[in-house]
Amino acid sequence: MIYEQHYSMMFPTIEELLGRTDSKFRLVTLGALRACQINSYFGQLGEGLGAMVPPQVLTMSRKPLSIAFEEIASDKIIATDPPEVTEEDLLADSMIPTGEANLEEAALEQADGDAAGLDEADLDSAS
């Protein structure tokens, strides 16, 4: 009698999954992030938005984490490193372009001028 391999928390095995990533931490984060995406997909299914990626494997599992692990085991989901951010990139993102800075300075000067003008007018009407 031939038994079909039933996917559960026992399959795919942890050894097989660890072979697909470089660390336990990466495996846990990748599985958790993908499980959240799968859960969101099933949550928005009736709304017709189509913004989330559906499960990439045919499975009998109903739990998002089990589906995510099956996707990792079948190499449908692969962990990648984010691009490196240099100090120059951080400085460029934090700098305000000169056009916006000039507009902000002009708005501050105008606000200071209006406040000074109101003070003089209040003094003239009071006397």
Image (cartoon, helix red, strand yellow):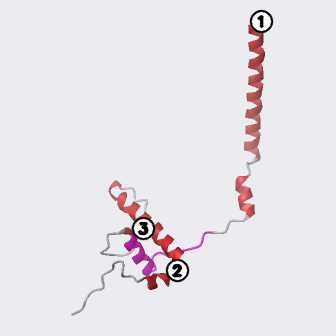
User: In the image shown, does 51 or 69 lie closer to the viewer?
Assistant: 69
Q: Which mark is residue 21?
A: 2
Left or right placement of residue 87 versus residue 38 in this view: right
Residue occupying image coordinates x 45% and y 85%: 15
Could you say which quadrant of the image residue 108 lies in? top right
**Number of residue marks:** 3
Q: What's the amino acid at mark 3?
A: Ala
For the residue pair 68 and 75, the one nearer the viewer reads as: 68
Q: Is residue 109 above or below residue 86?
A: above
**What is the secondary structure assignment of the residue under circle 2?**
loop
Highlighted magenta segment, given as a residue range: 65-82
- Disc with the residue nearer the chain's start (1 vs 2): 2
Quadrant in the picture for residue 13: bottom left
- Residue beneath disc 3: 35
- Point out the residue furthest to the top here: 127
Pick whichever of labels 2 and 3 is earlier in the sequence. 2
In magenta stretch: residue 92: no
Q: Quadrant of the C terminus?
A: top right
Q: Position of residue 60 (x, y in %)?
A: 30, 75
Q: Residues within 10 Å of mark 2 (few under 14, many from 20)?
A: some
Instruction: Pinpoint residue 62: horizontal percent, then vertical percent.
Output: 32, 69
